[in-house]
Amino acid sequence: MRPARSAALSWYQLKRDLDAEKSEATKDKQSEDMRSRNTEVAHPAVKRIRKTVGRGMVNLCADLIVHLSIQISVDITDTFFRAFQHRQRVDRCCGLFDEDSGTASVHNQTTAQLRDLVHNLSLEQLKYQELLNSFKSAFNQRMESLELSIAYAHNSQRSLISAQQRYYLQLIKSRDRDLDVLSSELTSTRLLQLDEVRNSLFDVNSSLASLSSQLAEVFAHIRRKTAQNVQLSILDVILSDQCNQSCAYSLTKLSDAIFGLKEHIKHLVSVVAFLGVLAACGLSNRVRV
């Protein structure tokens, strides 16, 4: 902003100098000089130098380009203002002033300042363009790296999920195999236990059958013995010629013998019941095993 401010002050000083010169010279002579110079001033093609900065092309004007902040149109000669407004060459427009006057050096200094200002602005524009290009490239690189990071994270998440799914499927399959093995073992164990129970029942039944046959033989033998004893007692009573006392004694003896046989029979029945209980207990123990 300081070069623009100094340029504005220079233009204001130039205006005052022009007013002083206009008051000294005649208006007709100045108008004729301006007309003659206007006819000589053409619209030359502006020389431009093209420079490549990064990806874009920046055009640098080698001649004076009037900045908007220094376009002062207050009481400036129309020809001079149009020359700056239409970006004509400054050196031709500067011929409007007399080189021998005291303001020629001021005008030349102002022109040099304006040229320096334009050059600085062009350099700033190049600098900003370079910064913009570098920012764009850095931003594109950051975006590419971000996209790659997102893709990598997505792939990592998918691989992790698939690995966990495979792991859990393997666990389920191994559990099913273990359950199948356990069920087969339980089935085989149950079948073996059933076979053992059936064999034990068959043994118990066979032992009970043999025991019942033995008991039947014992009862038959007891009955035979009882019948023989009764018969012998009766024969003794009939054949004996003893007195009534001896008969009573015989009857008493017979009754004692019968009572003894009954007791013996009761004892045998209790023994058979005890054997049955023992057989039942052995069967239950085998079933529990």
Image (cartoon, grey):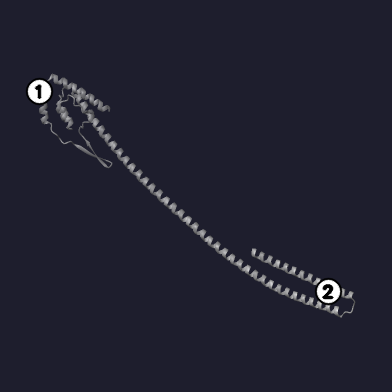
For disc 2, the neighbor class at 10 Å (few under 14, some 14 to 19, many from 20) is some
Image coords of residue 42 (percent x, y): 13, 33
268 horizontally vs 237: left or right: left
281 horizontally vs 83: left or right: right
Number of numbered callouts drawn:
2
Q: Is residue 265 above or below residue 108?
A: below
Q: Which mark is residue 29?
A: 1
Image coords of residue 270 (percent x, y): 75, 68
Mark sitting earlier along the chain (2/1)? 1
| Quadrant of residue 64 within the rendered picture | top left
Please tell me whether mark 2 sits on a helix, a strand or a loop. helix
Q: Is residue 98 above or below residue 223?
A: above
Amino acid on which the number 1 mark rests in the picture? Lys
Image coords of residue 49 (percent x, y): 21, 38
The residue lying furthest to the top in this view is 24
92 horizontally vs 6: left or right: left
Please tell me whether mark 1 sits on a helix, a strand or a loop. helix
Is residue 237 visible in the rendered image? The answer is: yes
| Quadrant of residue 56 within the rendered picture | top left
For disc 1, the neighbor class at 10 Å (few under 14, some 14 to 19, many from 20) is few
Q: Which residue is mark 2?
A: 254
Residue at 25% across, 25% down: 6
Is residue 102 visible in the rendered image? The answer is: no
Quadrant containing the N terminus in the rendered view:
top left
